[in-house]
Amino acid sequence: MKGYCLIVTTAPDKEIAGKLAEGLLNERLAACVHMQDVNSCYVWEKKLCRDEETVLWIKTLDKHYDSIEAYILKHHPYDLPEIIKVPVTGGLPGYLQWVAATTSSGTSQ
């Protein structure tokens, strides 16, 4: 299953997460974005932080990674947002075809 990936990022709240998701969908860079509230623990600037965030699971094609990264960097409030690309090594063929059609043609099914 070459050519597909899942991109993960977090946002400080549902409103910003929703705006990021809508922008990526409107630009046809993503076929689907799931949003989930999470409690994050991390070290930032030598300080232990605990925050409520919203994680975005972005389903897309590999070829859109650079554009998605640029979009997130432009519209994200964090100085250093999490942006992780996870390759998709398998999946339901019909679903993956829908991802490709939605993000490649500019029209969703």
Image (cartoon, rainbow, N blue to C red):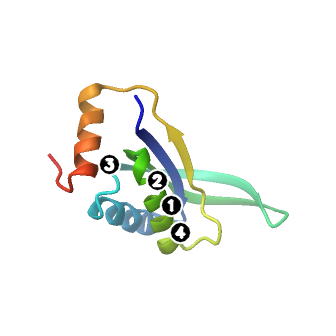
**Which residue is depicted at the point 60% across and 52% down?**
39
Looking at the rendered image, the disc whose residue lies closer to the viewer, 4 or 2, is 2
Q: Earlier in the sequence, mark 2 or mark 3?
A: 3
Q: Secondary structure at mark 1?
A: helix
Answer yes or no: do the residues labelled 4 and 1 have beta carbons within 8 Å? yes
Residue 65 disc label: 2
Q: On the image, numbered disc 4 is attached to which residue?
A: 73
Q: Is residue 104 above or below residue 69?
A: above
**Which residue is depicted at the point 36% across and 26% down?**
91
Give the residue type that dot 3 points to. Cys
Answer yes or no: do the residues labelled 3 and 1 have beta carbons within 8 Å? no
Label 1 CA crowd tier, 10 Å (few <14, some 14–19, many 20+): some
Answer yes or no: do the residues labelled 4 and 2 have beta carbons within 8 Å? no
**Which residue is depicted at the point 54% across and 65% down?**
12
Give the residue type that dot 1 points to. Glu
Q: Is residue 79 above or below residue 6?
A: below
- The residue lying toward the viewer, choosing from 78 and 72, is 72
In three-dimensional space, the C-alpha distance between marks 2 and 3, rounded to whole angstroms, equals 14 Å
Where on the picture, by quarter, is residue 88?
A: top left
Answer yes or no: do the residues labelled 1 and 2 have beta carbons within 8 Å? yes
Answer yes or no: do the residues labelled 4 and 3 have beta carbons within 8 Å? no
Q: Earlier in the sequence, mark 4 or mark 3?
A: 3
Q: Secondary structure at mark 4?
A: helix
- The residue lying toward the viewer, choosing from 103 and 10, is 103
Q: Name the quadrant of the N terminus.
A: top left
Q: On the image, numbered disc 1 is attached to which residue?
A: 69
**Which residue is depicted at the point 64% across and 53% down?**
40
Q: Earlier in the sequence, mark 3 or mark 1?
A: 3
Q: On the image, numbered disc 3 is attached to which residue?
A: 32
Q: Position of residue 89 (x, y in %)?
A: 46, 28
